[in-house]
Amino acid sequence: IMFNFFVHETAAMSQASGVVINTWDELDTDLLDAMSKLLPPVYTVGPLHLTVRNNVSKESPLADIGSNLWKEQDAPLRWLDGQPSNSVMYVNFGSITVMSKEHLLEFAWGLANTGYAFLWNVRPDLVKGDDETTLPPEFFAATEGRSMLSTWCPQEKVLEHEAVGIFLTHSGWNSSLEGISAAFQWCVGPSLRSSRPTAA
């Protein structure tokens, strides 16, 4: 469904009066130059998450508008408050990326074996074809005291938190923009990329 949507929208772009993209000129200079030769005027408006944060009052109902598909939990922020500066790895594979149960378990044990503290967003639908994402009790025992699992958390606030030192991401567009804006060190799992041009 998503592939067909992108094919249709890409074909329709040449008929548009203009193309608006959530990026900025300095980030995508070569891409924007190439697009401007093929398409109607191309306008950059990004990063949108900073536009909202910097121009909308915190009291406004618009301040609660986010760019995610999941309900955010605040417990991870409280957990981060108790961690030393730059000591936590934040792990998020985005709102639509899926993996096999074997990949999830291998990744979980990889995290456990690092010995580092981590905050990991594990969505209920992260495992492909499974209604529920579950990890073995041994994993929780091995990471007790240095791990926090959440179904979703406010990523921008997490990336701005002083306890977070590195961001392990699938390199989706929103995560990329938020990571760049927060001037973050990243790790990108090549088998987790949902968007080749972003992760290239």
Image (tube, helix red, strand yellow):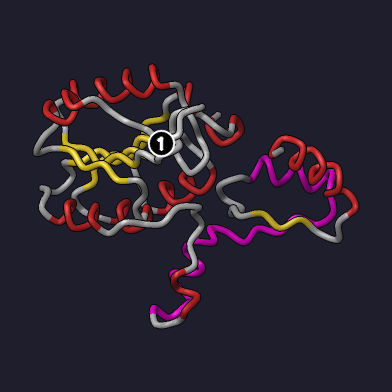
Residue depicted at 59% across the width and 54% down the height: 24
* 160 part of magenta stretch: no
Mark 1 surroundings: few (<14), some (14-19) or many (≥20) residues within 10 A:
many
Identify whether 106 is placed above or below 149: above
Question: Residue 157: image x %, image y %?
Answer: 32, 58
Residue depicted at 43% across the width and 81% down the height: 57
Residue 145 in which image quadrant: top left
Of 190 and 93, the residue lying toward us: 93
Question: Residue 198: image x %, image y %?
Answer: 56, 36
Callout 1 amino acid: Thr
Residue depicted at 72% across the width and 35% down the height: 3
Q: Which residue is mark 1?
A: 169
Identify whether 90 is placed above or below 105: below
Question: Residue 50: image x %, image y %?
Answer: 47, 64
Identify whether 149 is placed above or below 51: above
Q: Main secondary structure of the magenta part?
A: helix
Of 184 and 91, the residue lying toward us: 91
Provide the secondary structure element on which disc 1 rests.
strand
Range of the magenta residues? 29-58
For the N terminus, the image quarter is top right
Which residue reaches farthest front?
Answer: 131
For the C terminus, the image quarter is top right
